[in-house]
Each structure stands twice: as C-alpha cells, then as structure tokens.
Amino acid sequence: MPLQGCPRRARIRVGTTQQRFMRRGTTAFFFLKAIAAPSNIPTRAELTGANATDLAEAISDIEGWALENVPIETPDMASEFTTSIPGEDKADNSSFTLYEDKVDGTLETLLSKGSEGFVVILRKGDIVGSKSMDVFPVRVGSRSATYTAGAEPAKYKVSFGITAKPTLDAAVPAKA
C-alpha cells in the first residue's frame, strides 16, 4: 500500500514470457582470421568456413569482452558537486583461459602472440536474426601456460588487445 501523499512508482513490465537462460551451453565463441565486410559483420559462410574456429569447447574462463565509457569530469565554480559527461569508450582487458591439448597444438598456434583476427560472440546462441552478435577486432598480446599443483586440467591464458571499435548487437546471419 503506497504511503499517503507519495505517488505510486511507474513499473515497467518485462512480461511473464521472458525466457532467461544460462550463457554456458548457449553462447557461442568463434575466432575468425578475416571478415570481408568493412562493417566487420561476418557472413554465415565466414562463421562456418575454414577461416573460423569454434572456441566454445576449449574455453574454461572468460574475462572482459565489454566496452566501458570513461566519463569526463566537468566541475564548475557554481557548485560543490562535480558533474560529468560521457567520454571515450574503452574496451576492457579481454582474455580466454583455454584447456591445453596434450597432443594437438593447432589452437595454440592459431592464438600465438601477435596473431590478428576477430573474436565473434553469439551471446544468445546461433539464433538467426537475433541482434546478439558482438564482433571484436583483436591482436593476441600474450599466450601463457597456467600452472597449479592442484588436481586441475592443464590450461593456458590468451590475452587480447582490442584493435578497433567492436561491432555490438549485430544480427546473427542467416543459415545457407
């Protein structure tokens, strides 16, 4: 019951049909050596072709893969409060921790220091037309083994530099 004299807050209804999901098992991760379009939006052929590597089964942990805005403070002499305006966008430090393969080094070679390409993330999975594809132009900054005395699988961490503005919320391309 609202307090007397207090206006009732407007509520935004999400709806009872909202389908929540867990990213693990749904979100898809690819490394593409090249994308032809200047928009950096891959075609279906590029996502499934020889230049594309599906990383999902090898990923143990993920860090970053988001943009952050660095606000600019705008103090003035009329107030003790410091206001701010939106500033430049900056990509978070981004990395994957991957399971190491005892025999096959294909993925380690693909993601060696200095390698360039695109990390493509289908946030909601491969749902054609869904505006949930993020594309990050990248260069591998480092790849290093992780060591532990614990009972864990062998892993290595690949750190990426985001080399250009990512394309966010692009539509997942149609299947052939």
Image (cartoon, rainbow, N blue to C red):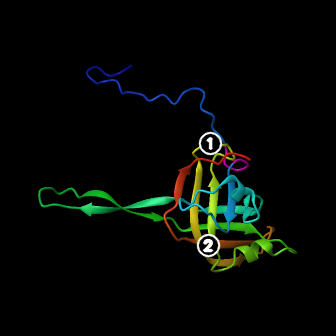
Q: Position of residue 46 (x, y in %)?
A: 69, 59
Mark 1 burial class by Cα count in 10 Å: few <14, some 14-19, many 20+: few
Density class for disc 2 (Cα within 10 Å; few <14, some 14-19, many ≥20) is many
Residue 91 in sight from this viewpoint: yes
Q: In this view, does 46 lie above or below 131?
A: below
Q: Nearer the viewer, residue 37 or 86?
A: 37
Q: Quadrant of residue 94?
A: bottom right
**Which residue corresponds to the image point at 69% horizontal and 67% vertical from the top-left?**
97
Q: How many marks?
A: 2
Residue 147 can be seen in this image? no
Q: Is mark 1 on a helix, strand or loop?
A: loop
**What number is the disc on residue 159?**
2
Three-letter code, disc 2? Ser
Residue shown at the point (44%, 30%) measured from the top left: 12
- As drawn, the label of residue 129 is 1
Q: Give the range drawn in magenta.
A: 22-26
Q: Main secondary structure of the magenta part?
A: loop
* Whole-percent x, y for residue 31 in the image: 68, 64
Q: What type is the residue that disc 1 sits on?
A: Gly
